[in-house]
């Protein structure tokens, strides 16, 4: 069976690549008048650490989204309207990441940090739901999938996404009371995925 | 017959992917002084709903444009200057969408809403005309098309585009008197396309 | 002989696609206070015509650059450092177009129009030189080219680029004295290319 | 053995293409009031030369990064988590280049030039380390590499990257005392690479 999702993957790769690269536009050159002390630039750059932090975690969260997309579409050989739609939602969320990321960078050190972190963690609840939806829609119709794929592998992939959901929901819930803890949970989850991704890779 | 439009499709995919991802740059971080009430950020974010609305409908309108482009070029195997030109106009309009979208986001809640909506709906009259032009140019020379394509399928694809035209024209005309109704018609048309796209898919 | 320039073409397509889509960022939403007369938005939009004009001609000039790139690389099968370098210059100029385009949009109706038009037309002298360089470097080593390519076709392609050079030089020279005439020459040249590109296409 | 890194290369090409094209957004249209002397625009444009300089060297540094990426991935046929991670770091740094480049453009003629140049040269120490890491991770497991690749070629490629490291470290160290010399060393190194890349190309 020929794989007919090549152009969807190419388009999705494009959106992920652009979304991940646009993040840098949220790093702003410090405003300094020219006549000042040469050491001031380093001080001003240091003060921008929430921007670097948001840039780094958002970059790698989109990178993980892309790697997951890659992994799921290796199993999807045919497409239908529902798959297109679920993929559209994933791309929508991927392109949107830079906005909560900019909110995080701007408000992390202000009294509004809690709201910014709730938006940021809530975003990834939606991302997780979108991947669950995509895999649910693909796996309920075996004729869409790579013919050699075993039932065990399908269940394994499904569990992989479902298993992130309670963690993200926990982070989102906590963000209203302990925002920094909530953010830490998300970052730890991504580190765990990066490290453990070898094991959950489907053959 | 070998398909010789691969690089056109790759380039077009690139333009669609960038156009759809640049939309997020129109979402702006609210300007708040740091010392304010923590609840203010959520209030400010809520006030930006016209921006989110414009982002969502523009994202999915470009997504539908891309899916249509995909569908048309599956039938086009050879290219000539006229096809290149019509495709150029489609890409031009796709890259332009973010501008009427930004106007809509900025002016939806102001007395200038009518003008912004007329520009926005007028934009999609042009998009529809461009797709009609592309398919007209392609279908009048059968040597450009996939050899197995039947006459019935050609007519069906043509009707598919022509059928959107009166709806867009109606929306554009109404936008001068009932702008919100006009906008609603466009959104309903996109929802209808998303839902019904299975049926009109050519085999 | 296998074509080994596929990844160069893919990367170049990416740069052209992004350069052409970023042009829209130079269109700015008019600044209006919310309480004004509803007709003001259309008036403000009308005043921005130099921006639309610059957007349109720059879009189609990059589109023609891409179509030319496509045409040249259909004949190039192998690459060396010189080809990589010449292609790098072409991509550099393609990514730069949005800057002279923004200058043109901003200053077309001001006393600085002449300087903006000289920069704009001078830009396309460089673009033409870069294409001449690429084709010179490729054609002097037949082992880089598609084996079936005839001498006549090589000469024809070379003349195609050389023939644009005096026109661009004329436009650049005139831009210091009759800037609008100079701009008109460039636009006419692009229209001529778009219309006549069928004839100069190599088989 | 089938090459399974095609989608990684496509995604990476996308990131490089976008990163290189976004650099132009750091060139700003001069702010002039409309009624001024027509010669002022050329003067204002001339004053922006640090911006052009930063644009040019950053463009070609990303271009060299891409060419290197191309060269390394021609030898990598299979991927694992470590390769994905090292590639992620390279893409992260590629997408980041525009920020130190903007700092360089803004502060090159100010008392803060030293800090901006230290950031800029330090950036390329990290880039070099990331390429060394990628090649180290790929070359320690021969099953990931193109089967025909000889030991000699592996060592040669490794030396190629290691050899840049002391130069970048020297430039970074010097940047604290002789910033312009440090910048000159980086630019000379890139010129040297561009000229000598033929020789170090692996067959």
Image (cartoon, coloured by chain):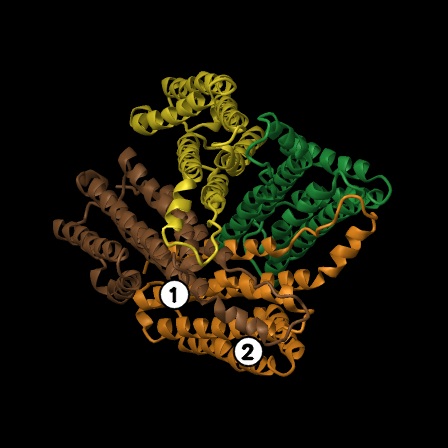
Chain colours: A orange, B brown, C yellow, D green
Q: Nearer the viewer, residue A165 or A179?
A: A179
From the viewer's perspective, is the residue at label 1 or at label 2 nearer?
2
x and y, in percent, of residue A185 in the image = 63, 77
In the image: residue A158, left or right of residue C194: right
10 Å crowding of disc 2: few (<14), some (14-19), many (20+)? many
In the image: residue A11, left or right of residue A174: left
Residue A4 visible in the picture: no
* Residue name at image x 39 percent, y 59 percent: B111
Q: Give the residue number, with chain letter if any, for mark 2.
A: A168
x and y, in percent, of residue D40 in the image = 62, 28
In the image: residue B56, left or right of residue A57: left
Q: Nearer the viewer, residue A29 or D12?
A: A29
Residue B18 visible in the picture: yes
The chain that hosts pointer 1 is: A
State the SS at label 2: helix
The chain that hosts pointer 2 is: A
Q: Work out whether D7 lies above or below D110.
A: below
Q: Earlier in the sequence, mark 1 or mark 2?
A: 1
Q: Give the residue number, with chain letter if any, for mark 1.
A: A76
Same chain for labels 1 and 2? Say yes or no.
yes
Q: Nearer the viewer, residue B28 or B137?
A: B28
Q: Toward which corner of the image does residue A180 lie, by quadrant? A: bottom right
x and y, in percent, of residue D72 in the image = 61, 47
Distance Cα–Cα, label 1 vs label 2: 26 Å
State the SS at label 1: loop
């Amino acid at each position: 069976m020929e794989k007919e999702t090549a152009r969807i993957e190419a388009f999705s790769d494009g959106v992920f690549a652009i979304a991940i690269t646009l993040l840098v536009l949220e790093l702003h050159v410090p405003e300094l008048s020219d006549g000042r002390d040469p050491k001031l630039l380093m001080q001003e750059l240091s003060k921008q650490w929430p921007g670097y932090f948001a840039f780094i975690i958002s970059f790698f969260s989109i990178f993980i989204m892309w790697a997951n997309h890659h992994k799921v579409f290796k199993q999807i050989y045919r497409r239908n309207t529902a798959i297109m739609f679920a993929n559209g939602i994933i791309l929508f969320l991927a392109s949107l990441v830079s906005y909560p990321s900019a909110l995080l960078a701007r408000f992390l050190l202000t009294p509004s940090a809690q709201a910014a972190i709730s938006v940021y963690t809530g975003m990834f609840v939606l991302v997780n739901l979108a991947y669950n939806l995509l895999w649910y829609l693909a796996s309920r119709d075996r004729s869409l999938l790579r013919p050699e794929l075993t039932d065990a592998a399908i269940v394994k992939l499904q569990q992989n996404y479902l298993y992130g959901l309670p963690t993200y929901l926990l982070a989102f819930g906590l963000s209203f009371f302990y925002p920094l803890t909530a953010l830490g949970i998300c970052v730890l989850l991504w580190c765990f995925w990066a490290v453990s991704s070898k094991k959950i890779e489907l053959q």
